[in-house]
Amino acid sequence: MMQRIYFDNAATTALDPKVLEEMLPFLTEKFGNPSSIYSYGRESKMGIEAARKTVAKILHTKPGNIFFTSGGTESSNTAIRAAIRDLGCNHIITSPIEHHATLHCAEYWADQGLKVSYVTILPNGHVDLESLKALLAGHTEGKTLVTLMHANNEIGNLLPIKEVGEICKAYDAIFHCDTVQTVGHYPLDFTDLNVHFATGAGHKFHGPKGVGILYISDEVSIKPMLNGGGQERNMRAGTENLYGIVGFAKALQMATDTYEEDAAYIESLKQYMATQLQEQIKEVSFNGDWNGDSLYTVLNASFPNTEKSEMLLMSLDMAGVCVSGGSACSSGASVGSHVISCIAPGSNRVPVRFSFCKHNSKAEIDTVIAKLKEILAQA
Ligand SMILES: Cc1ncc(COP(=O)(O)O)c(C=O)c1O
């Protein structure tokens, strides 16, 4: 079988065998319903509460501020809905380059008659903070929810989250931050960041899929996300994803333990890829602030549009290389990414996102560069 090269770690990551090992007992002998009062149930409940404690400690908050969910999408939907339903927000400020988990929520609420405004995005992909301030200042009839992502999953740009939190505070706005690409990748102190809501998804840092967190600060009090049993302190009813929650905490702990060496190694891969592309592929350029305030995991390259590059994703897939072109397209041809069209309007260049993890190597990059040269007939 062809050896695959996986450079799509911003989409999802491989489950770490040690995380699986931690999860397995909760799929087998520790199967009790966490709400049951006998020993089997208590054992499961302890697994969940230990996980919550671990997560809270790493993110510098209290266990009571961490709610387990099904992932980033649910967490963002919940935060946005709660801000409108329970906290009196009648205005959403977001950006045109958010993940669809946020953008489609904003569109839904706009359809319901809510005022939705979009900050200006600078050509390098950063949020224009002056436009954020102007939008906040211009809304005088009620409360605003600001929902901006910490790191853009397509181009990697990082938001100055603390500064945005301070701006929101100055205007008495609620701040929801999609931190899906940074939880498990950076040391984060939720208490210090002035965020009201933040999110995380286990599968982005070698944990399991279908489990995430919603951080809710003490400053806000919201109504239940799901009604039913009293799980998650009455906030999200339904028997918990026990093994997922245990896996989330283990993956976050592991990511935190080796953060410095992993981040340095992955950054070196990103820089090597960028240099190799620049040296070996004609007319390549990069999207976003790739060499500045950017994720160390993501490099979004842009290739000139030719007959060969149009089918680049599919050709790379056939060569065993897994990458993404922004918004995934079932045919493998790259279709318009809302992020790229925002920062490079009218461009017909072909974007390819390479995203790395600690399991990747320079040798893999060399192979991908050679395959790219072949596909683009630049050999
Ligand atoms: C920035 C960002 N937000 C939200 C999500 C959605 O997370 P999930 O797939 O866990 O629902 C993703 C992942 O796809 C993401 O990259």
Image: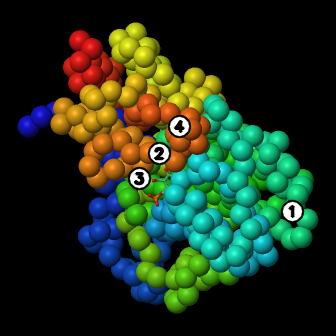
| Residue at the disc numbered 4 | 346
Marks 2 and 3: in contact by CB < 8 Å? Answer: no
Residue 105 is left or right of residue 119, and the answer is left
Front residue (pair 256, 226): 226
Distance in Å between CA atoms under marks 4 and 1: 32 Å
Closer to the N terminus: mark 4 or mark 1? 1
Distance in Å between CA atoms under marks 1 and 2: 30 Å
**Residue sitting farthest toward the bottom:** 228
Q: Amino acid at mark 2?
A: Ser
Say what secondary structure mark 4 lies in: loop
At label 4, counting other C-alpha atoms closer than 10 Å, the crowd grade (few under 14, some 14-19, many 20 or more) is few
Residue 151 seen anywhere in this rendered image of the structure: yes
Closer to the N terminus: mark 2 or mark 4? 2
The structure residue drawn at horizontal position 91% and vertical position 65%, both measured from the top left corner, is 140
Closer to the N terminus: mark 3 or mark 2? 3
The structure residue drawn at horizontal position 41% and vertical position 71%, both measured from the top left corner, is 241
Front residue (pair 102, 17): 102
Marks 1 and 3: in contact by CB < 8 Å? Answer: no
**Residue sitting farthest toward the left:** 1
Which callout, 4 or 3, points to the residue nearer the camera? 4
Q: Which mark, by number, is residue 337?
A: 2
| Residue at the disc numbered 1 | 139
| Label 4 C-beta lies within 8 Å of the nearest ligand 1 atom | no
Say what secondary structure mark 2 lies in: loop
Q: Which mark, by number, is residue 203?
A: 3
